[in-house]
Image (cartoon, rainbow, N blue to C red):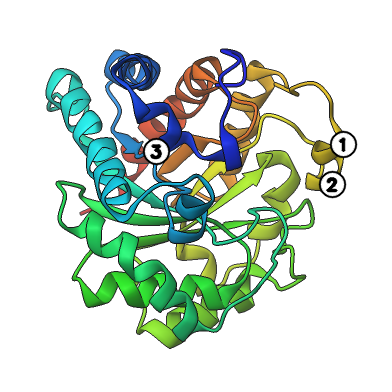
Amino acid sequence: IFDEHIELPCFASFTVLKDEAGCQWMVNYLSTFASVAQKYNVGLILETATWRAHPECLRKLAYSEEDAVNVNHKSVELLCGIRDIYETEQCPIVISASVGPRGDGYTPSATMSPEQAKNYHATQIGVLSQTKTDMIAGLTLNYPQEAIGIVQAAKEVDMPITISFTVEKDGKLPTGQSLKETIYLVDKATDNAPLYYMVDCAHPSNIVHTFLADEDWVERIHGIKGNASKKSHAELDECTELDSGDPLEFGADNQELLCKMKHLNIFGRCCGTNYRHVEEICKSCIPVFHQLEHNKRRYTV
């Protein structure tokens, strides 16, 4: 989106869907990733453009309640159309409806209690539950209470839910809390409701050390949505140009992470990445998955 010089007020990608030209651009953009998934015969999780489609952001952008419903529905419908074209037996496609933090994804501000977070996000999650989305994903969350509220809101409408936390270079949340503590808190408060956890907005090489513990909380993490850049969030905030990193190195670093965390099965993209980074992940990680599957068959009686 940055490369295309598309303006996103409030970082709200749903604003692209305001007209047919924008909708077509979004379809073309996401179809690029679907093409890569189909080329390499891997599954694909398509995420809706609803990360910022929550009440406060919608009000700032002068969207009515009807507009809010329409934009959430429209985003899912576009992905359904892409799935109809690209899904195969070797390339299953899951549609995941994105729910973002009320505040900034890098810095926790105006923090809420779990009950407040549930009430705040329930409207959007309720709307999304009436679409053809397969699941809800709480993304770039940076403190456990908001995650708990999002999970509880999803549970109330019987929607599968996954949670992804923003982490710093030390592997901790912006609050300073460890992933271990955070995952335990969310699981305890929600009866282990999240299908799995992910981390996002971090380069894989910066956080590989975080997951070396042989503990059950590590097994709850199944995915990473990596940044192209190895810079910290504070450093990225000061950047005047996009740091796209090195796609080849990015693929290799994801491979290294997979070799250390063999239960990971979701590798995605976050800030500064594009289809080239995703293709390098495929090239680097698919051979490892094949070897892991071979070893599993060899040792299974």
Q: Is residue 94 left or right of residue 4?
A: left
Q: Could you say which quadrant of the image residue 9 lies in?
A: top right
Relative to the observer, which residue lies in front, 14 or 246?
14
Label 3 secondary element: loop
Residue where numbered disc 3 is placed: 49
Compared with 102, 87 (above or below) is above
Which of labels 3 and 2 is toward the front? 3
Q: Earlier in the sequence, mark 3 or mark 2?
A: 3
Looking at this view, is 81 or 281 the one in front? Answer: 81
Vertical comparison of 270 with 192: above or below: above
The residue where tag 1 is placed is: 238
Which is more N-terminal, label 1 or label 3? 3
- Mark 3, residues whose alpha carbon is within 10 Å: few (<14), some, or many (≥20)? many
Q: Secondary structure at mark 1?
A: helix
> What label does residue 234 carry, if any?
2
Q: Is residue 133 left or right of residue 223?
A: left
Q: 118 left or right of 96?
A: right
Quadrant for residue 298, please give it: top left
Q: Position of residue 22 (x, y in %)?
A: 37, 19
Task: Tell me the amino acid under the disc marked 3.
Answer: Ala
Measured in 3D between alpha carbons, the distance from the residue under mark 1 to the one under mark 2, in whole angstroms, is 7 Å
Look at the numbered discs 1 and 2 and tell me whether their residues touch, using CB distance below 8 Å.
Answer: yes
